[in-house]
């Protein structure tokens, strides 16, 4: 096919255990903007890019998958202030893994209140 039909990713859907708690965490801790909240879902936005949709799901649902029994992230965020962000999350009692470096590229993993594994890199 010479001409692609798809142009961009509009949104990501992430399962959460408690919608109200997750809205509060994503808006207060991560600074996402609440755009819409109704029934079992909420639409959040970053400064730019795809929307982030929280969906209240079954308690054991997660937005990541496993490889050899280990959780792998599905969503990666970008920041130009990665070390400051790592410290910020740590001081707010967010489950955060240690900073890693790969050929000048820094990244780390962290978890939302529902246990979804997320990544951020610079």
Image (spheres, rainbow, N blue to C red):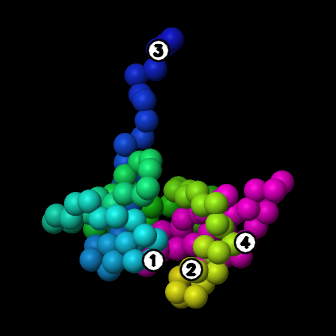
Tell me which residue sits at (33%, 78%) in the image: 24
Question: Mark 2 or 1 closer to N-term?
Answer: 1
Q: CA distance from mark 2 to mark 1?
A: 8 Å
Cβ atoms at labels 2 and 1 below 8 Å apart: yes
Q: CA distance from mark 4 to mark 1?
A: 19 Å
Q: Nearer the viewer, mark 4 or mark 1?
A: 1
| Percent x, y of residue 102 | 80, 57
Q: Is residue 98 visible?
A: yes
Question: Mark 3 or 4 closer to N-term?
Answer: 3
| Percent x, y of residue 73 | 56, 60
Residue furthest to the left in view is: 39
Task: Name the residue beneath numbered marker 3.
Answer: 3
* SS for dot 4: loop
Q: CA distance from mark 4 to mark 2?
A: 12 Å
| Percent x, y of residue 61 | 39, 67
Q: Left or right: where does residue 44 sit relative to residue 8?
A: left
Task: Name the residue beneath numbered marker 2.
Answer: 89
Q: CA distance from mark 3 to mark 2?
A: 42 Å
Question: Mark 4 or 2 closer to N-term?
Answer: 2
The span shown in magenta is 95-122
Task: Name the residue beneath numbered marker 1.
Answer: 29
């Amino acid at each position: 096919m010479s001409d692609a039909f798809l142009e961009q990713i509009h949104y990501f859907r992430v399962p959460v255990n408690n919608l109200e708690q997750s809205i509060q965490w994503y808006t207060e801790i991560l600074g996402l903007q609440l755009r819409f909240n109704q029934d079992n879902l909420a639409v959040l936005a970053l400064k730019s890019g795809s929307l982030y949709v929280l969906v209240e799901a079954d308690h054991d649902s997660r937005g990541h998958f496993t490889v050899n029994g280990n959780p792998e992230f599905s969503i990666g965020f970008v920041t130009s202030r990665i070390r400051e962000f790592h410290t910020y999350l740590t001081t707010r009692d967010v489950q955060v893994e240690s900073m890693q470096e790969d050929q000048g590229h820094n990244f780390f993993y962290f978890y939302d209140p529902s246990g979804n594994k997320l990544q951020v890199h610079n």
